[in-house]
Image (tube, grey):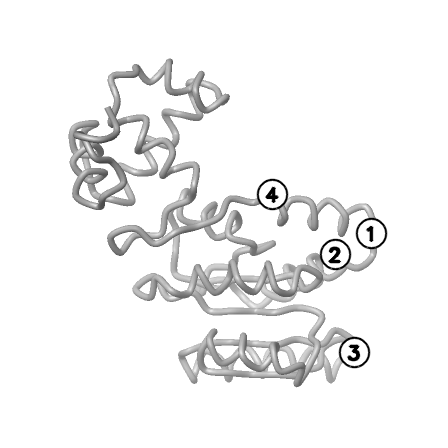
Amino acid sequence: MIKVAISESAPLFRRSLIELLNTEYQNSPRYHIVLETASNEELFEALLKNIVTPDIVIVDLNIHNMNDILIVTELSKTFPTIPIIVFSDLTHKNAILNILHAGAVSHLSKYSNSESILETIKKVHHQYYSSNKYRSEMSELKSSSKKFTKVAGYVLSNREIHFLKLCSSELTYKEIAGKMNVSFSTVCNYREALFNKLSIRSRVGLVLFSINSLLFNPFLDL
């Protein structure tokens, strides 16, 4: 039996998800909802109090609440043996990758059908708990995953912050790639991701963002 904890701010969607899992549970003894909350903060606090120990955590990520991705990171760090599945309205590839880098093991669109939801939960549970090698790899991945920091209202990874600081220098993108020990294409991906995330169109805009958010001081850092 798979013990599931659910955090979902929309009551109707939360109830629909619980009913879906309960229906599947009645057909075969597979799911047991051990915790349901209306916010990720409530779920995190409940887990800290050891009220329950779920096998899988399903959380809602509100794109308008920047704390949600930080809580995913904290959940992953504090409970590294519990896999996290994130539900959201996100469709942009880079935004979804940020969720996975934050510590989630899978992402589901809120427009997913019932079959996709059930299949994802089964797959995550099977991979995470049936393979010691997989669990070891996930633990290693989480311990080395990108840390996130809130900068001027935006959640940025440490690699993105490092890239922004180097962008504020006279280095070319190719030289920045050498400094960061990554490929030129990876640096281009950082640039495009930040253009989209910060609604910026040029390197000059990235430099101005760095200065305005105090990531870079042109009088001290040159």
Mark 3, mark 2: which one is toward the viewer? 2
**Left or right of 13, for residue 174:** left
- The residue closer to the viewer here, 85 or 148, is 148
Could you tell which of marks 4 and 2 lies nearer the N-terminus? 2
Q: Tell me the CA gap for discs 2 and 1.
A: 6 Å
Q: Say if 99 sits above or below 79 in the image.
A: above
Q: What residue type is labelled 2?
A: Tyr
Position of 81 with respect to 65 (left or right) is right
Q: Position of residue 132 (x, y in %)?
A: 83, 51
Kind of residue at badge 1? Ser
Residue corresponding to mark 2: 128
Whether the residues at callouts 4 and 3 have beta carbons within 8 Å, the answer is: no
Above/below status of 100 relative to 204: below
- Residue at numbered disc 3: 28
Q: Is 99 above or below relative to 112?
A: above
Identify the image quadrant of the N terminus. Answer: bottom right
| Mark 2, other Cα within 10 Å: few <14 / some 14–19 / many ≥20 | many
- Residue of label 1: 131
